[in-house]
Image: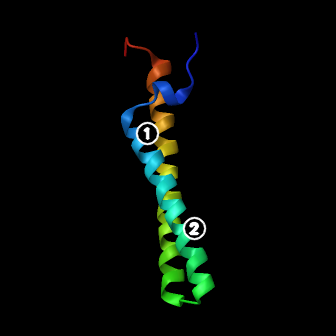
Amino acid sequence: MLNDFWETASPLYRRVVLSGMALLGVGIILNISANLGRVAWLLYASLAIIGLGLVTHLVGIGIRARDTRRRLRGPNR
């Protein structure tokens, strides 16, 4: 039976993806609250957090590609 990638993913990939999602969520919540309260410094901080979440997601994509390449090469190499 075929498993989806999340079940067979490495713990590092899982941590990176969940961290990226958490950073994006916190950034969006801070951005909404900064816009509602018209707090400029919080707005810029929230944009930095969202950017960090996006970078973390890109790192996760790289880790997933690396794991897939290793899996396709097989255990002989």
Q: Which of the marked residues, 1 or 2, is nearer the chain's N terminus? A: 1
- Identify which residue, 40 or 48, lies in the foreground: 40
Q: Residue at x 48, y 72 (%)?
A: 48
Give the percent coordinates (x, y) of residue 49.
47, 68
Q: State which quarter of the image contains the N terminus.
A: top right
Residue 68 visible to an observer of this rendering: no
Q: Amino acid type of disc 1?
A: Arg
- Above or below residue 14? Residue 59 is below
Give the percent coordinates (x, y) of residue 50.
53, 66
- Above or below residue 16? Residue 1 is above
Q: Residue at x 46, y 47 (%)?
A: 18
Q: Secondary structure at mark 2?
A: helix
Badge 2 local density, few (<14 within 10 Å), some, or many (20+)?
some
Residue 77 visible to an observer of this rendering: yes
Q: Quadrant of residue 9?
A: top left
Q: Number of callouts in the render?
A: 2
Give the percent coordinates (x, y) of residue 67.
45, 30
- Pointers 1 and 2 in contact (CB under 8 A)? no
Q: Residue at x 56, y 82 (%)?
A: 34
Q: State which quarter of the image contains the C terminus.
A: top left
Q: Secondary structure at mark 1?
A: helix
Give the residue number, with chain letter if any, for mark 1: 14
User: Which mark is drawn over residue 45?
Assistant: none
Give the residue number, with chain letter if any, for mark 2: 28
